[in-house]
Amino acid sequence: PDQVVVTHGSQQALELLTRVLVDPGAEIALADPAYVGAVQAFRLAGATLVGIPSDRDGMRVDVLAERIAAGARPVLVYVVAEFDNPTGATLAPDRRRALADLANRCGFVIVEDDPYGELRWAGVRTPGLATMSDRVVTLGTVSKILAPGLRVGWAVAPGELAAALVRVKQAADLQTATLTQHIAHRVLAEPGFLEPHLASLRTRYEAQARSLAAALRVELGDRITFDEPAGGMFLWARLADVDTRALLPAAVAAGTAFVPGAEFAVDDVRPDSLRLSFATAAPAQLAEAAHRLARAIG
C-alpha cells in the first residue's frame, strides 16, 4: 500500500512524476509516435524529448541503447508496453528485458503507462516491466475499463519515489476526490463483477476491431496498410500517398473522423499515418465509417 499513490487519472500521475524527476532541459525518451498527453506533460515541464523509433514490436530499445551510448542521458523513459497509443503495438518480451537491463545499468526510471492491458483479447499478456526492474513506476486507471469521468488512476512506485509523489500530490490538490474513489472501489470490488465485465469489453472490442479492419480492406484494399489489433482501442494505419492532415476536413465533411498521425509525432512526422478508434461504435457504424473514409479519399 505504501507504494500506491491514487491520482486524478493516470494523466495526473504523469504530471506529478515530472515535478519530482524532471528539471528543465532534462531528457525524456519515449517511442515516436507517442501518446499526446505524455508529450504535453513532458514539454510543459521543460524536458528535452528524445524520440525513439518504434515498430510492430514497440519501442526500438536497441536504438535507445545506441542513443545513450552516443551521449543521451534520459532521466525517464516513458512506454505504453501493452497496446501503445497511438500505434497499438505491444512491447516484445525481449525488448522489455533489454529495457529493464538498460535502466538498471544507466539509472533512469521507466514509467510504464498501462491503461489498455486488461483489454487484450488475443494472445497472452507479457509480465509488466516492474517484474524485471525496481526502477519502474507503473501507472493505471479505471478510465478504459469503467468510466473516464471518474478520474481515478494510480501510480505504483518504489518507496522513496512514492513518498515524494505523495508530497507533491498533497501540494497540488491535497487528495484525489473521496467520492469518486469510493464509487470506483464499490463497483470494482463488487463480487462477480470485474472479470465478466472485462470479458464483455474484450468480446465487444474484438468484434468492433475486426469489423473495422475488414471494412478498411474492402473499401481501400492495398491503399491502406495496418496491423490488426489484438487488444486496446485503436487501429494505426498508413495511407499510400495521402497527407492525412490534408484529408481530415474532407473526411469530416463526409461524416467520419480520425486523428492524423502527425499529431503524435515527437520527431518523425509521418504524414501518411492516422489513428482510428473502434471503441465507441458498433460494427455496422464502423463499416460505414470506412466507406465514408474511402469516399473522402476519392
Image (cartoon, rainbow, N blue to C red):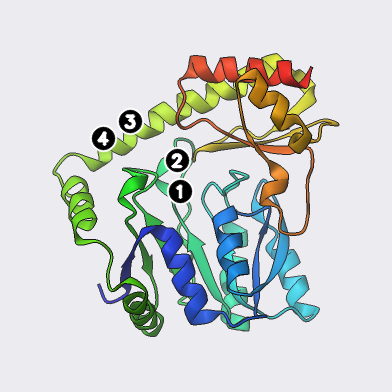
Marks 4 and 2: in contact by CB < 8 Å? no
Label 3, label 1: how many angstroms apart (C-alpha)?
Answer: 18 Å
Q: Secondary structure at mark 1?
A: loop
> What's the amino acid at mark 3?
Ser
Q: Residue 179 vs residue 126: left or right?
A: left
> What's the amino acid at mark 4?
Pro
Residue furthest right in the image: 241
Q: Nearer the viewer, residue 298 or 61?
A: 298
Q: Which residue is mark 4?
A: 196
Q: Secondary structure at mark 2?
A: loop
Q: Residue 271 vs residue 206: left or right?
A: right
Query: What residue is at 69 percent from the left and 33 percent from the top?
Result: 226
- Which of the numbered marks, if any, corresponds to residue 120? 2
> What's the amino acid at mark 2?
Arg
Marks 3 and 4: in contact by CB < 8 Å? yes
Q: Residue 48 vs residue 11: left or right?
A: right
Residue 263, visible in the rendered structure:
yes
Please determine whether, in this image, residue 6 is positioned above or below residue 84. below
